[in-house]
Image: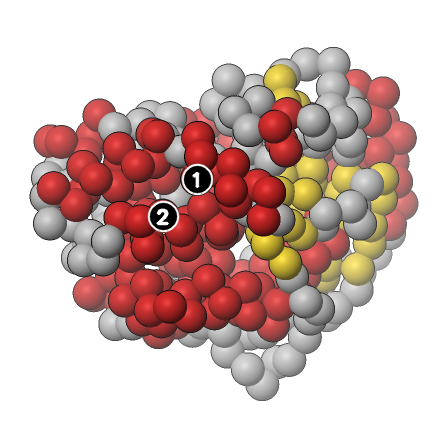
Amino acid sequence: MNSSLDFQAVLDDIVHTLQPEAGREGKVASYIPALARVDAHRFGIALRTCDGHEAVAGDGDVPFSIQSISKLFSLTLAMRHMPEAALWARIGREPSGNPFNSLVQLESEQGKPRNPFINAGAIAVADRIVELYGADARGTLRGFLSHLAGEPIVFDEEVAASEAATGHRNLALAHFMKSFGKLDHPVAEVLDLYFHQCALALSCRQLARAASYLARDGAHPANADEQVVTERQARRINALMLTCGTYDAAGEFAFRIGLPCKSGVGGGIVAVVPDQLTLCVWSPALDATGNSHLGMKALELFVARTGLSVF
Ligand code: GLN
């Protein structure tokens, strides 16, 4: 453990340095009103060390729409409760090199998504969660997040309804997969779960906490006696984050930051330093790949200041 580092001072310094740049570059997601009206000047950061120490700065306690960061938790839930071989028979583990909502590779790959972190892959995971929990799928996922974060987590129902009203691309992806026999459950049911998971609202602090099992060899964030997933599974999820967690920018993230990361179009990014800490940054303005522009800069600054890396 890097106990000599004063993490609170590091986070305060990052906010002090970058806050003036918030909203200057990039664009806030505008496909639904609830995201379009988020203030582009928001900037939050939080971390939790493996031994439970937390540091928070800027808007790190303000809840935001976690969007695709939810794919981390839905994958974890599926890995926890079904044989892994059956899961990976349906979903690949290769980076796509394409935008997160791309349809192009699905045709040549017979409806099998390239990885669980692009939309198609997360929809396939949602199908597995509906298989496992039926009508309780939403509640189970929400309960799982609450269990990890140590406090009740809620869906932003306005976001969920707008996702459903505007989610034509996701409907196309789901129906296309269904046409290849790759979804077992009705598209409407699977997407109801997917749209709700995108609409989970958490703060940076809650996300850093909830994802902490990924830095603790799979152990629950606050209870070392409970394995959320096995050590090997935690490593595998981290590997997927590094290679696929930020879509077609995954190479750039590995190059510039060197940590497993998972982003969402709400502007959040979760990063893991195995055996040390989890970190979450939030700034809503996105770059062309759908990743938070300032969030990426903040992570770069964090690794520069702390020397932390998986390499
Ligand atoms: N709700 C968004 C979608 O389904 C989530 C995408 C993302 O965060 N990258 O397209």
Residue occupying the point 64% across, 25% down: 36
- Which one is earlier in the sequence, the residue at label 1 or at label 2? 1
255 or 269: nearer the eye?
269
Mark 1 neighbour density, 10 Å: few (under 14) some (14–19) many (20 or more): some
92 in relation to 88, above or below: above
Query: Percent from the top left, x then y, of residue 168?
Result: 35, 30
Cα gap from disc 1 to disc 2, whole angstroms = 8 Å
Q: Amino acid at mark 1?
A: Ala
Q: Is residue 92 at least partly visible in the picture? A: yes
Picture layout, residue 86 above or below residue 174: below
CB under 8 Å between callouts 1 and 2?
Answer: yes
Depth check, front residue: 75 or 183? 183
Indicate which disc residue 191 carries: 2
Q: Residue at x 79, y 60 (%)?
A: 54
Residue named by callout 1: 164
Q: Amino acid at mark 2?
A: Leu
At numbered mark 1, what does the secondary structure look like: helix, strand or loop?
helix
Position above or below: 211 against 27:
below
Instruction: Please tell me in which quadrant of the rendered image residue 235 appears.
Output: bottom left
**Residue 56 percent across, percent down from the top left:** 82, 50
- Residue at 25 percent across and 28 percent down: it is 103
Q: Position of residue 59 (x, y in %)?
A: 81, 41
